Image: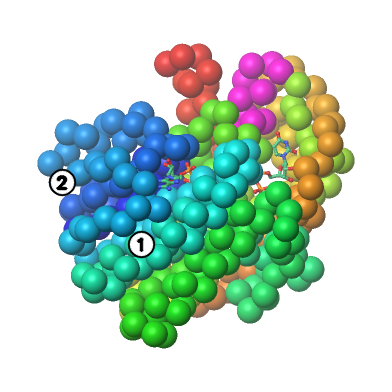
Amino acid sequence: MRILITGGGGFIGSHLCERLLSEGHDVVCLDNFFTGSKGNIRHLLDNHRFELIRHDIIEPILLEVDQVYNMACPASPVHYQYNPVKTTKTSVMGTINMLGLAKRVKARILQASTSEVYGDPEIHPQTESYWGNVNPIGIRSCYDEGKRVAETLMMDYHRQNNVDIRIARIFNTYGPRMAEHDGRVVSNFTVQALRGEDITVYGDGSQTRSFCYVSDLVEGLIRLMNRDDFTGPVNLGNPVETSILEFAERIIGLTGSSSKVIFKPLPADDPRQRQPDISLAKEKLGWAPAVELEAGLKRTIDYFAGVVGGK
Ligand code: NAD
Ligand code: UDP
């Protein structure tokens, strides 16, 4: 198949490009390199089945493909809050453009949605039937509401125009090729620990997250894309939940670092707790994460050791 991956130069997108090429597909990677980098896909450039297009999805584009993975959108709070209007445009105008493309060429399209559609959840763990608790006017809204509208657009193109859609609600995912300075907790803590700098826990560290290794997530995305008669939305994430303070201690332990934990103010609207209920993914996709946190973190620490050491 010929497969378009928007945001293919980013963290998750680059792993998806790699995996789909290894399965023998033609891959078109489209990226404006706002948060992604050519370094993430440099090793793919010599592959004759790989094509790279520098393009911003808020502008229309004409391409002929069989499948579209719409991954383009800054994902870390620091990056998506840098230009919040642009973030909303990417999720809304970008998704309209990709849905228009899918409609024109009758391609199946998968939207990278997020656990942020649940906001600061009052239901725990979060199931797909929960409608969420999202602040529409806060500093995270450009991302959360943008992704919610993107889901709405997906469903309306499906109902109105019969577009073949898939919606994945991705929970916190980590692994090699996360950007060193993207401000997310896994990259921040790992880089701080490797450099012997203070580990910056926001708030008292009692808020929770559940971390999924990138190869597990990519497997879930591909299963969802290729499963017939199931649009989602479906949660994809690892249900093993940890507090951010425990997570800091774990990174210190695994890196053998002398870093100390320091506490910084909690950003506004930071969700208190997050854990996916993955019963639906298990039932419909036969999917569950396979990589344990410690194994995934060791691979991620090895990667960042190369980045920090200038390898
Ligand atoms: P990332 O920032 O590494 O990747 C996003 C990619 O999209 C980058 O390469 C960036 O340059 C590109 N991009 C951004 N705006 C664009 C635009 N207007 N036009 C073209 N390209 C554009 O982030 P990631 O972690 O790889 O996330 C990928 C997708 O998965 C995002 O849509 C994100 O919202 C979603 N997601 C990720 C997580 C996670 O924990 N990593 C969780 C939930 C959802
Ligand atoms: N966080 C932290 N220190 C950091 C970066 C993040 O304590 O240096 C916290 C953040 O406040 C949040 C959690 O870690 O509670 C996850 O943050 P991240 O930005 O990775 O993702 P998200 O909040 O979008 O889940």
* Residue 279 locus on image (x, y percent): 58, 74
* Residue drawn at x 48%, y 61% as measured from the top left: 92
* Residue 262 image-quadrant placement: top right
Per the image, is 195 magenta? yes
Label 1 sits on residue? 97
In the image, the residue with mark 2 has its CB under 8 Å from the nearest atom of ligand 1? no
| Residue 221 shows up from this direction | no
Q: Residues within 10 Å of mark 1 (few under 14, many from 20)?
A: some
Seen in the picture, residue 33 relative to 181 is either above or below; the reply is below
Per the image, label 2 sits on a secondary structure element best described as loop
Magenta-colored stretch includes residue 95: no
In the displayed structure, does residue 214 sit left or right of residue 117?
left
Disc 2 residue type (three-letter) = Arg
- The alpha-carbon separation of the residues under discs 1 and 2 comes to 24 Å
Quick check: 42 left or right of 185?
A: left
Tell me the residue at 67%/75% (across/down): 131
Mark with earlier residue (1, 2): 2
The residue stretch that appears in magenta? 186-197
- Is disc 1 placed on a helix, strand or loop? helix
In this view of the protein, can residue 54 be seen by the observer?
A: yes
Packing grade of label 2 (10 A; few <14, some 14-19, many >=20) is some
Quarter of the figure with the C terminus: top left
Q: Is residue 179 above or below residue 256?
A: below
Q: Where does label 2 land, which residue? A: 49
Residue 180 vs residue 209, the one in the foreground: 180
User: In the rendered view, would you say 120 is above or below 154?
Assistant: above
Task: Report the predominant secondary structure element of the magenta stretch.
Answer: helix
The residue located at (41%, 85%) in the rendering is: 159
Where ligand 2 lies, by image quadrant? top right
In screen coordinates, is 242 left or right of 162?
right
Residue 51 placement (x, y as % from top left): 20, 44
